[in-house]
Image (cartoon, rainbow, N blue to C red):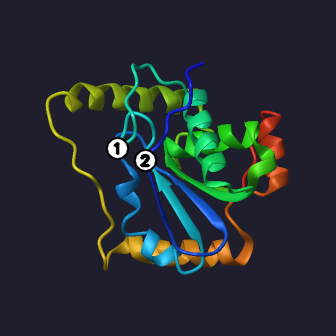
Amino acid sequence: MARAVHSAYSVEGEGPALFLIHGIGASRASFAGLVPHLKKEFRCISYDLRGHGLSPKPQPPYTLQDLVEDLEALRAELGIEKAQFAGHSLGGMVGPAYARNYTQHLISLGLYSTAAFRTDDDSAKVKGVVAAIAGLAGRMATQQHQCQPDGPSIRGAQNLRKRISARGFGLSRKQVHLLAGSQVAHS
């Protein structure tokens, strides 16, 4: 297993810690339109996964466990004992893996637009799409996706903020324990 990298990160807001974990090919900038709506109630920590954004790019391949250890190193560096975690896409795979390994630091876990819990057939289709995108990535520049100030993502952020305030993120501690036992749990 590779050593954890020192991830580039941003911290905004006050309140309970909320780690925002982006998807493949993105960066923490993908949360630029979301954080202003969440930082009123949460200490939002967005970071660049290894090989993304301003974080180090060690020699690939990167394993899911590498990404988990990077997140744990960041949590420890910031001195945060317990936090909420939200993962998008690849981040939605890092989140459950982190929760299985570091349950003691988890308040709740939210997953959206993720590959977690897909069937084998779904996973094969996603891998085909990822392979096609990877082929294109070498030939074209990537553009960061940011939320539009008046678009549906802002309404989504407002709904997300309400949901977090009401009952925390999607998966409860009990559901995370179920995940650790390889059972699929839904919120």
Quarter of the image holding residue 1? top right
The residue identified by callout 2 is: 8
Residue 116 visible to an observer of this rendering: no
For the residues labelled 2 and 1, the Cα–Cα distance comes to: 6 Å
**Residue 18 in picture, x, y percent from top left:** 60, 62
> Dot 1 lies on which element?
loop
**Residue 102 in picture, x, y percent from top left:** 75, 41
115 or 104: nearer the viewer: 104
Q: Is residue 138 left or right of residue 30?
A: left
Q: Residue at x 59, y 72 (%)?
A: 42
Q: Residue at x 45, y 41 (%)?
A: 49
- In the depicted structure, whether residue 115 falls above or below residue 145: above
Q: Amino acid at mark 2?
A: Ala
- In the depicted structure, whether residue 136 falls above or below residue 171: above
The residue identified by callout 1 is: 54
Please identify the quadrant where the C terminus is shown: bottom right
